[in-house]
Image (spheres, rainbow, N blue to C red):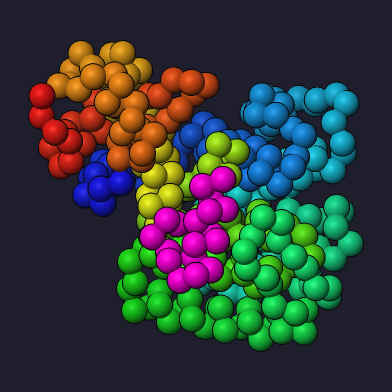
Amino acid sequence: MNQNILDTLRSKLLERISFDTLPESALKRSAALNTWGTNAIEGSTITRAEAERILLEERSVAGKPIRDVMETIQHERAFRSLLNRRKREITLETVLELHEEVFRGILYDAGQWRRVNVRIKGAKFAPPRMEKVVKEMNDWMNEYRKRDIEGEDTFELASWMHYKFEWIHPFGDGNGRVGRLLLNLHFLRRNWPFVHVLPPNQKEYLKALNAASGGDFSLFVNLTKTLMGASLVDLLDQVGTKKDKLITLKKAVKISPYSEKYLALRCKQGELPALKSGREWRTSERALGLYSDLVGRKG
């Protein structure tokens, strides 16, 4: 994803709103999407429709494990709390509080560092032993603070921060969800919107973490930029102008020099900011114009 495209979309978003004045409807939609996605990656049985029923319609769902329902409700609250936390420094207390907020009444050790050794399914890296967790977390916090103060690139720092947290795996359970909350808190502190890691991103997400374990953060940087592009066009669709209204690729070809196949490929590759609903990609006139001016071929 071209950084200039992201910067321009972000500027347009911040011309319309600040994160302190984000409309409740947009916040609720983002919170429901993020909560469904992060829990589904970890095996929750709650579907997206059921998460929206619980969180947007405030209605119950039948036949679901109570743990999955509680994690849905409590993660959504923790996610919303990020807006209040974004003007404060991230500390180890922040990490413990987020874990406790998501897993209160679910895990016996909610809000506590792990006292067991753990492995990560599908990962090529192994977390440190339990007795090293506190030291590693202190080192993680100090290094993040140093890089943040020095003004390291937002996406590069996000990638290092998230990978290192997941490598430490400081909790007995819930590390992925807390790590992704911290990832979003980092973006909000830098005045960028949320990103949503959803089930379709799971393989790419794990691949990026594995690459980071070998010192290559480029996959994670590219992934977060793609996710940020989707988030920006989604929010602008809700608070922007007519140019920000999401349109299908069938409509996009009528206002661009590109074929539908070409646009679909660029959406899939993360070059054109877009959202996918079912099998259909949607982008906006503004995003399409920026892509055409800054990246795409003509004709």
Camera-side residue of 18 and 189: 189
Residue 47 horizontal side relative to residue 26, left or right: right
Q: How many marks?
A: 0
Q: Is residue 239 visible?
A: no
Q: Residue at horizontal 80%, vertical 38%?
A: 69
Q: Please say if 52 is above or below 295.
A: above
Q: Nearer the viewer, residue 290 or 239?
A: 290
In the image: residue 117, left or right of residue 225: right
In x, y percent, where is residue 127?
Answer: 68, 72
Residue depicted at 43% across the width and 64% down the height: 217
Magenta stretch? 203-220
Residue 149 in view (yes/no): yes
Please tell me whether residue 59 is drawn above or below residue 292 in the rendered image: above
* Residue at 80% in and 40% down: 68
Where does the image place residue 12, in percent across and percent down from the top left? 26, 41
User: In screen coordinates, is 153 left or right of 173?
Assistant: left
